[in-house]
Image (cartoon, rainbow, N blue to C red):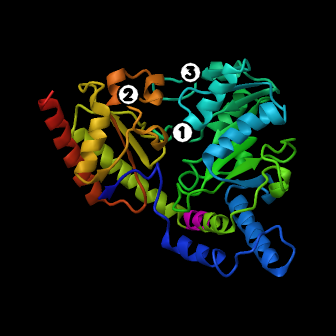
């Protein structure tokens, strides 16, 4: 199997697994317990929080642990409007992950002031539309890197166009791939996840800028500075911090390789499958290349991914969260692509573990699959 779906999830780094193991067995304490076993666990959680916060240029007190990106995104949207009432309206980009789009649509269904911001053909925000929603009681949710196309949204520019708004960014796909410094980014909230950077599933983090009166959305024991009750998953938190450590220590090496892989894949697709349309801009995130096929009809989308799987190539058509829905990509539709293009799509998402040989084999097989499918239409 050639695995080229690293935006969906990544294999856990063996070094991360090794670091986690003692916290399942020897050091199994509850971080809220005051005895030695509990205090040992508390120190591990505090040290992990410090390491992750340092990696993104934040203060440890600005970071709470969650179960992942989806929970963090929902916590911000529901927490800011319903619980904390620091915002009375919410808007997000049309190409957001469903973990943002769905709660915004839910807010719209509840009669809240909410809406969707349009994007350009390249997937970038329409800045005049952003500026229309500059208000201190408005929450703007704009992802840092799009999970389907790799389009990078300039969050600092969002802040320039909406200096008074409350800004949240889903940074799940940018952690470990792009430099992140919260002071320069300008966001008030940011969501992160461990399993996109070779860490464990089920653990993520939410950055909440100091001074924001964000109230608990999950109540009970008062953990995470009274903002997310529930016993901390110590082993997962330790694993998260180690995954961040390796991603930061190896950042230059990993991103250099990703850029080389990205460039090679683009050239290869253009040479071998010239009819393909590359939906990912060359200035986008280095680990994502999204291509579509205008000549294929909407019924081919899911079959295309299945046929690649049969030939031993693991790719996707977009977010794993909506895989199997047989619906065209909402991201590509928002970018003005036809329903055919938005349906017959392959997303290659790469890793520092990916090889040139794997890309060569995958594109050769993709070309053969497309020819066979079109010949049988």
Which residue is at a point 32% across and 43% down the rendered structure image?
266
Image quarter in which the N terminus is found: bottom left
**According to the image, label 3 marks what residue?**
118
* Mark 2 neighbour class, 10 Å CA radius: few under 14, some 14 to 19, many 20 or more: many
In primary-sequence order, the first of circles 3 and 1 is 3
The reply to whether residue 246 is in sight is yes
Which residue is at a point 24% across and 27% down the rendered structure image?
296
> Relative to residue 153, is residue 32 drawn left or right?
right
3D distance between C-alphas at marks 2 and 3 = 17 Å
Q: Which of marks 2 and 3 is in front?
A: 2
Q: Percent position (x, y) of residue 19?
A: 59, 75
> Relative to residue 264, is residue 336 drawn left or right?
right
**According to the image, label 2 marks what residue?**
342
Image quarter in which the C terminus is found: top left
The image shows residue 190, relative to residue 130, as above or below, that is below
The image shows residue 291, relative to residue 232, as above or below, that is above
Magenta region, residue range:
243-249
Q: Percent position (x, y) of residue 27?
A: 70, 78
Q: Which of 313 and 57 is in front in this view?
A: 313
Cβ atoms at labels 2 and 1 below 8 Å apart: no
């Amino acid at each position: 199997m050639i695995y080229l779906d690293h935006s969906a999830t990544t294999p856990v780094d063996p070094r991360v697994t090794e670091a986690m193991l003692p916290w399942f067995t020897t050091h199994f304490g509850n971080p809220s317990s005051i005895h030695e076993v509990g205090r040992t666990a508390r120190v591990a959680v505090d040290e992990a929080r410090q390491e992750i916060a340092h990696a993104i240029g934040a203060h440890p007190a600005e970071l709470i642990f969650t179960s992942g990106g989806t929970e963090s995104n929902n916590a911000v949207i529901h927490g800011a409007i319903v619980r904390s009432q620091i915002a009375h309206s919410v808007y997000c980009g049309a190409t957001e992950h469903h973990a943002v789009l769905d709660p915004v649509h839910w807010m719209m269904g509840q009669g809240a002031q909410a809406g969707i911001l349009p994007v350009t053909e390249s997937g970038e925000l329409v800045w005049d539309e952003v500026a229309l929603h500059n208000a201190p009681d408005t929450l703007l949710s704009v992802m840092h890197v799009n999970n389907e196309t790799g389009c990078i949204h300039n969050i600092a520019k969002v802040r320039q166009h909406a200096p008074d708004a409350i800004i949240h960014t889903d940074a799940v796909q940018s952690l470990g791939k792009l430099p992140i410094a919260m002071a320069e980014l300008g966001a008030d909230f940011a969501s992160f996840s461990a399993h996109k950077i070779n860490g464990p599933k089920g653990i993520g983090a939410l950055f909440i800028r100091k001074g924001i009166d964000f109230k608990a959305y999950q109540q009970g024991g008062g953990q995470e500075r009274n903002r997310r009750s529930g016993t901390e998953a110590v082993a997962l938190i330790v694993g998260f911090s180690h995954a961040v450590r390796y991603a930061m220590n190896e950042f230059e090496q990993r991103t250099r390789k990703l850029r080389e892989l990205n460039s090679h894949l683009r050239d290869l697709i253009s040479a071998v499958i010239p009819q393909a349309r590359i939906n990912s801009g060359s200035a986008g995130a280095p680990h994502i290349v999204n291509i579509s096929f205008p000549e294929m009809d909407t019924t081919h989308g899911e079959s295309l991914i299945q046929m690649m799987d049969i030939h031993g190539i693991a790719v996707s058509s977009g977010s794993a969260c909506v895989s199997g829905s047989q619906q065209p990509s909402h991201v590509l539709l928002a970018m003005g692509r036809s329903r055919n293009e938005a349906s017959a799509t392959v997303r290659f998402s790469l890793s520092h573990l990916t090889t040139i040989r794997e890309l060569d084999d995958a594109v050769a097989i993709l070309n053969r699959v497309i020819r066979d499918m079109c010949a049988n239409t």
